[in-house]
Amino acid sequence: MKNLSVVILSSGMGTRMKSLKPKAIHEVCGKAMISWVYDAARKADPNNIVVVTGEEGDYTSFLDSSAIIAKQKEMKGPVDAVVQALPFILNKDTVILCADMPLVTADIILDSVKKAQDGDLSMLSLTDDKGNYSGMYVFKTDALADAIDKISSPDTSEIGFDAIFDALHALGKKTGTMELEKEYLIDVNDRVALYEADKLLRKRINYKHMYNGVTIVDPERTYISPDVVIGQDTTILPGTILEKGTVIGRECVIGPDSKLTKASIGDKTEVVKSVCIEASVGENTHVGPFAYLRPNTKVGNNCRIGDFVELKNSNIDDGTKVSHLTYVGDSDVGKRVNFGCGTVTVNYDGSKKYRTTIGDDVFVGCNTNLVAPVTLKDGAYTAAGSTITDDVPEGALAIARSRQVVKENWNDRRCNK
């Protein structure tokens, strides 16, 4: 909306939060409250957005480069915070929001401005259905400046928006209210309200995905950050947490009790009771249960990553199976490789880390230690229980273990001592 400024008040520390960090950066559904409010304001397309912060508040990482930052040097209340923003408000209308109102939407901002304009109101206050005022107002900018000039004093710490309301009436200006459902106007002042806001936004996010063709079996036990992308016909099972930056394809099954952070999951892939952090998984692959995919891991198509498997900084090509009780770190693994149970890539010598390279169609026997740097070429085999320290040629079998010795009647001799 043109000829509009939005001011976001975020200078308060929020003592009732019982926290060492500013209230505005506490997260709701994995996103800082100030980011929720700022994004809603940005979608309303104003001419500018002014964010008022305290001297110790640095919110630049939660905003974009177009935000104008005004500093409130002393915590003297909301009117003093608006005073700090006035030099940057150059448009006809001004919306004032508080950074602890994460459920406000761009539509609410636009509707409230339109109602104020249609009614020729100098001040529009938003209230819930019981008449309680929230922390959101629409002003004619010149009327706001006149009211603040009328009530200004050296100490504005006790002055609130009710004083601006009274000043506007004294100046003969017209004011009004706009009623909304309480859930849109909830202000978060403590951890209980933080939970309530999280619950409401979680419902909003989950329902959006469900309307777009995703099955969420239990929305109350599914936690999805707002920027997560999920393809059609994917099923999300209870207890699943999908954090920011995660992209999931079509016809997947995620969960139960899986956690994905900045993960990429291909079509028709299953992730069961597992954790994926900054990892990518291809199509038609099964992960879990109890698998841990750490950053910089890339798993291909038609793979199986089984129970109690940990992958880190590794590339696993198509058709490879790492079925159970295995650690693969700093490795490049080819196609159709089979890892036996208990395999470990020994990638760290106490000071440096080294890579393991495994070609296509390799069979790694159970309880094999691959001491990096080492290469297993295409079609190589390792015998169970081997510790491999040298490269294995193509198609060769490597046996690196002591020859078995059997001591007959040994137990009888031991017992007769």
Image: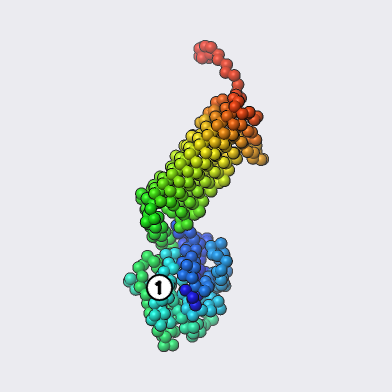
What residue is drawn where x is 47% and y is 78%? 93
Q: Is residue 217 left or right of residue 67?
A: left
Give whichever of 41, 194 is nearer the camera: 41
Number of residue marks? 1
- Residue 76, position as x, y percentages in the image: 51, 74
Is residue 316 visible in the rendered structure shown here?
A: yes
Tell which residue pokes out farthest to the left in this image: 130
Q: Amino acid at mark 1?
A: Asp
Give whichever of 113, 265 is nearer the camera: 265
Element under label 1? helix
- Residue 398, position as x, y percentages in the image: 60, 25
In the rendered view, how is the structure colored?
rainbow
The answer to whether 116 is drawn above or below residue 63 in the figure is: below
Quarter residue 113 falls in:
bottom left
Quarter residue 397 falls in:
top right
The answer to whether 190 is drawn above or below residue 150 in the figure is: above
Is residue 23 visible in the rendered structure shown here?
A: no
- Residue 412, position as x, y percentages in the image: 50, 12
Give whichever of 223, 285 is nearer the camera: 285
Q: How many neighbours does mark 1 have within 10 angstroms: few (below 14), some (14-19), or many (20 or more)? A: few
What residue is drawn where x is 48% and y is 59%? 31
What residue is drawn where x is 49% and y is 75%? 2
The answer to whether 172 is drawn above or below residue 94 in the figure is: below
What residue is drawn where x is 41% and y is 69%? 107
- Residue 149, position as x, y percentages in the image: 51, 84
The answer to whether 45 is drawn above or below residue 295 in the figure is: below
Task: Identify residue for label 1.
Answer: 111
